[in-house]
Amino acid sequence: MHVYVLKENLAYGLSIVNRAVASRATNPILEHILLATEDDKLRLAATDLEIAITCLVDVERIEEQGSAAVKARLFTDFVQTLPAAPVELQYDPASKKLLLRAGTDGSKATFNCMEVDEFPPFHLPDMNGAVRLTPETFREVVSQVAFAAAREEARPVLTGVSVRAKGGRLAFAATDGFRLSVRWVPLEDGQAEGWDFILPARALRELDRIVAKTEADVVFAPLGHRRQVAFRSDNVDMLTQLIEGNYPNYEALIPTSFHTRVVISRDLLLQACKRAQIFTRERFNEAVRVVIEPQEAGPGLVQVIAQDEELGGTESRIPAVVEGEAIALGFNVRFLREALEAMPTADVVMELIAPASPAVLKPVGRDDFVHIIMPMQVP
């Protein structure tokens, strides 16, 4: 391999594929990045066996086709120090060394490489039957769903995001057992028929970072025979392994009736939660009390109360439209804050049944997103 590539193009590609480099690998090759010429471009690839990412970058010219597997962190750190100029990369298979030359001062470096054949195979799929999302829709889906997935591995399926096609919509859902987020995306006729799989939430978060750099549509489809899902966004491809198991029947958890309905400013309620969290963040459960009261004349009232015997406390009083009965509930304030941060509208709806029943949060004027929070007891 003998290639000339602009430093900024090389650095861009490295910033993309480094998201898939294994941090603590039992197999040393997983700490490497594969560099390979492909037609008139340079392909960079990395994998930790859970996700694999490749990125095509433009080159100045290719003198000789070929490939090399170079240590990711060492190579990336060195490239970041280079000036904005063409970089020459020349790999010698006999010595297994990659020579890098850059700049007008003759700076150079050699990198010891591993055998390319040891790098896990990465087969780029066709995208037949794929679903296409705009970058704005994809980022909204990730921000509204992925945060609700479990972080602990006790129940692996809960660390993932359920993707199901039903009723002309594609549902993305995540739950950690204490909260549930569901976002629906409309489908074209016959699209995504039979889709029902569990994506690692981490894969969606990594792809979200990539999409922020490409600003391109996201095209994705499951590869059923391989238990993988392929994503494509501009010049970047990602494969992720699916999570095996049966996802909970979350649709049964979404209440269909309520006794109290509140319409309230998202920002005012969010700021109240942030103030309350200051007094609760040293507690394990981060519990706050939310009191909702209708008023005979004028707007109703929502109070967010946090008390700590050692630190003190805070109380916020927010005007709101309240229909139905007065009610007081306890919530994990971090869960409530994160749900509000995911809401895309200026006002939000809260639908409540009883102090021990799940609370429903929705954006006003939209029916494509719902968040459920389980209440908790607060002394």
Image (cartoon, rainbow, N blue to C red):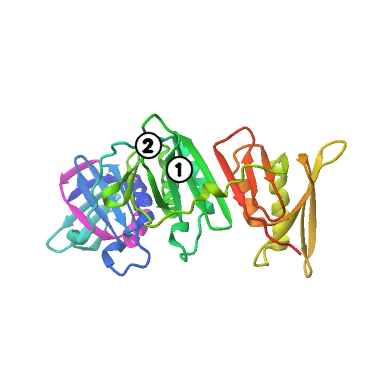
Circle 2: residue type: Val
- The answer to whether 199 appears left or right of 66 in the picture is right
Q: Which of 304 and 244 is in front in this view?
A: 244
Q: In which quarter of the image is residue 79?
A: bottom left
Residue 31 lies, in percent from the top left, at 31, 63
Which residue is labeled 2 in the image? 131
Name the residue tied to disc 1: 212
**Looking at the image, can residue 83 be seen?**
no
Q: In the image, residue 345 lies at what x, y percent?
A: 63, 37
Which one is in front in this view, the residue at disc 2 or the one at disc 1?
A: 2
Q: What residue is shown at x 85% (from left), y 36% (from top)?
A: 298
Residue 81 in magenta stretch? yes
In what element is the residue under mark 1? helix
Q: Is residue 303 above or below residue 29?
A: above
Q: Where is residue 252 in the image (x, y as percent from the top left)?
A: 54, 48
Q: Could you say which is closer to the camera, residue 92 or residue 320?
A: 320
Are the residues at dot 2 and dot 1 in contact (C-beta closer than 8 Å)?
no
Measured Cα–Cα span from mark 2 to mark 1: 19 Å
Query: For residue 275, what is the image quadrant?
Result: bottom right
